[in-house]
């Protein structure tokens, strides 16, 4: 699975390609300028930016959220982002729940940057990315990166053109990381991670997001020797014994090493395995809760594919088992099913750390000390924030489109107040003042013709008793008085309906 390239171990590119990209010859891809002419006009893109066929299961597996619910979630996320430190410290469980429901697409990039801690890291290192971007970089890593650019989501409109803005930004981010961490250099599995981030945020934000994933969430995954990913493979295999004993015994019987099937899953954070709707939901939870989500996804897929005797009858050997794990059935990768199963897996961060301690002892006994000392792994956004608390000013947002937030909040408050007032009016019509009593309580009409009723400028304003007494004595109200009362109620009902239509929250 690993080969030596430029003096270091790296994952074979064939093992971390998607099914779609493996059909493309490395020397001539759809990203070339000669083949791209007219391509985007003839083929439609889906809502994620993929040109037809690359994400064949996306439309069937995606869950459509009603627009009204989406708008409500956006308002809630905007409030969280504006008071991020308070939410993370005092109401982190609510943040986790909203990540499990799915981050609104319009705010996903910003939320990922805040969850990963990249926002604070960026503000504390102002100008660092520009400095790294201006440097030429190590030639050996530049050549390897340039060869991998056209392999990253070649059917996505952002990366489809060789030399386009997407590939240029991807090169900038990966080159900057080799300069930022020269002891690690570049690993092929970093490219899809950076590409996913670039689909949702600018190059500088994507760089700091990549830094946080490599240092906090998956430390040591992309270092020389790939020892961390091998260690996590053993952890996954040990946890599988608790989740699905049948699958565990089958893999142990055929001596299928975890590194054979989980390398692409973990190193690319399932970005090359799952349909895109599921990838986004997994990343929402992964950046919130840490690597335990990646373990849970792997355990769910293994349990679904190898967790029953009927399924094991179809794979009697190592080759059949590996083919089965390479072609996971679409129904197990469906967004709704997968998220539900992930949340039900009884594996916590403490379980992962306990098993990590056990496997690390076994590794040292069999292989000696780890050659690359990686920083400790942080399980989730809250621990990352507590380990390196950002300043309040570092969390301030700097949007490119400015909206008068105070005016917007005042308008929403006024709309809610008017809605409450109209509801009170409709529920208690007796509160509407009426300067005229009912005809049954009036004295007999006089001989002279009645005078017209006084015109009120505000129908909801109560007329003092001193003004009503001389009008009511010896005079009967006109016959149209009941109709006037009905008109006031009708107006109240109309104002209520219009208010409900204007305010959706």
Image (spheres, helix red, strand yellow):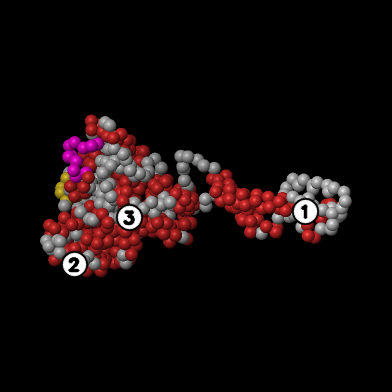
Question: Which mark is on residue 309?
Answer: 2
Taking the magenta stretch, the answer to whether it contains residue 493 is no
Q: Nearer the viewer, residue 82 or 142?
A: 82
Vertical relation: 312 (above or below) 196: below
> Mark 1, residues whose alpha carbon is within 10 Å: few (<14), some, or many (≥20)?
many
Q: Nearer the viewer, mark 1 or mark 2?
A: 1
Q: In the visual, does 274 lie left or right of 123?
A: left
**Secondary element type, mark 2:** helix
- Residue at 57 percent of width and 44 percent of height: 407
Taking the magenta stretch, the answer to whether it contains residue 28 is yes
**Secondary element type, mark 3:** helix
- Residue at 65 percent of width and 51 percent of height: 490
Q: Nearer the viewer, residue 408 or 396?
A: 408
Residue 108 point in image, percent of width and height = 39, 48
**Secondary element type, mark 1:** loop
Vertical relation: 175 (above or below) 235: above
Please give the range of residues in magenta: 21-31
Q: Nearer the viewer, residue 153 or 236?
A: 153
Residue 348 point in image, percent of width and height = 33, 65
The residue carrying mark 3 is 335
Q: How many marks?
A: 3
The residue carrying mark 1 is 435
The span from disc 1 to disc 2 (Cα, nearest Å) is: 83 Å
**Quick one: label 3 or label 1, which is nearer the N terminus?**
3
Residue 148 seen in render: yes
The span from disc 3 to disc 2 (Cα, nearest Å) is: 26 Å
């Amino acid at each position: 699975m690993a080969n030596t390239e430029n003096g270091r171990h790296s994952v074979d590119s064939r093992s971390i390609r998607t099914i779609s990209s493996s059909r493309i010859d490395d020397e001539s891809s759809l990203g070339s300028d000669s083949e791209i002419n007219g391509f985007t006009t003839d083929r439609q893109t889906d809502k994620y930016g993929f040109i037809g066929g690359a994400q064949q299961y996306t439309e069937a597996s995606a869950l459509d959220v009603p627009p009204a619910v989406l708008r409500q979630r956006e308002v809630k996320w905007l409030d969280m982002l504006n008071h991020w430190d308070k939410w993370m410290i005092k109401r982190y469980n609510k943040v986790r729940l909203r990540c499990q429901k799915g981050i609104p697409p319009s705010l996903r990039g910003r939320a990922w940057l805040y969850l990963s801690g990249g926002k604070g890291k960026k503000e504390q290192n102002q100008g660092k990315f520009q400095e790294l971007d201006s440097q030429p970089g190590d030639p050996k890593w530049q050549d390897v990166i340039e060869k991998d650019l056209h392999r990253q989501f070649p059917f996505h409109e952002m990366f489809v053109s060789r030399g386009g803005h997407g590939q240029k930004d991807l090169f900038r981010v990966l080159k900057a990381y080799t300069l930022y961490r020269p002891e690690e250099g570049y690993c092929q599995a970093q490219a899809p991670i950076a590409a996913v981030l670039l689909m949702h945020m600018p190059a500088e934000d994507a760089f700091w997001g990549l830094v946080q994933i490599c240092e906090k969430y998956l430390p040591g995954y992309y270092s020389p020797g790939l020892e961390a990913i091998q260690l996590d493979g053993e952890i996954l295999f040990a946890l599988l014994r608790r989740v699905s004993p049948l699958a565990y015994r089958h893999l142990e019987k055929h001596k299928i090493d975890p590194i054979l099937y989980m390398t692409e899953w973990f190193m690319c954070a399932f970005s090359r395995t799952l349909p895109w709707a599921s990838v986004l939901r997994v990343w929402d939870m992964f950046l919130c809760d840490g690597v335990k989500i990646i373990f849970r996804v792997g355990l769910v897929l293994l349990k679904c594919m190898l967790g029953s005797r009927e399924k094991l009858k179809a794979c009697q050997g190592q080759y059949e088992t590996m083919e089965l794990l390479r072609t996971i059935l679409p129904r197990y990768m469906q967004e709704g099913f997968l998220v539900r199963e992930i949340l039900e897996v009884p594996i916590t961060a403490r379980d992962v750390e306990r098993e990590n301690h056990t496997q690390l002892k076994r590794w040292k006994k069999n292989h000696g000390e780890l050659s690359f000392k990686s920083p400790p792994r942080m399980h989730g956004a809250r621990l990352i924030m507590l380990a390196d608390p950002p300043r309040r000013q570092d969390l301030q947002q700097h949007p490119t489109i400015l909206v008068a937030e105070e005016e917007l909040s005042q308008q929403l408050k006024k709309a809610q107040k008017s809605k409450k007032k109209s509801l009170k009016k409709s529920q208690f019509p007796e509160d509407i003042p009426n300067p005229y009593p009912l005809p049954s309580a009036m004295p007999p009409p006089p001989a002279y013709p009645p005078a017209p009723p006084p015109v009120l400028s505000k129908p909801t304003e109560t007329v003092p008793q001193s003004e009503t007494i001389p009008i009511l004595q010896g005079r009967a109200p006109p016959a149209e008085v009941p109709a006037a009362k009905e008109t006031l109620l009708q107006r109240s009902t109309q104002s209520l309906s219009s208010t409900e239509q204007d305010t959706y929250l």
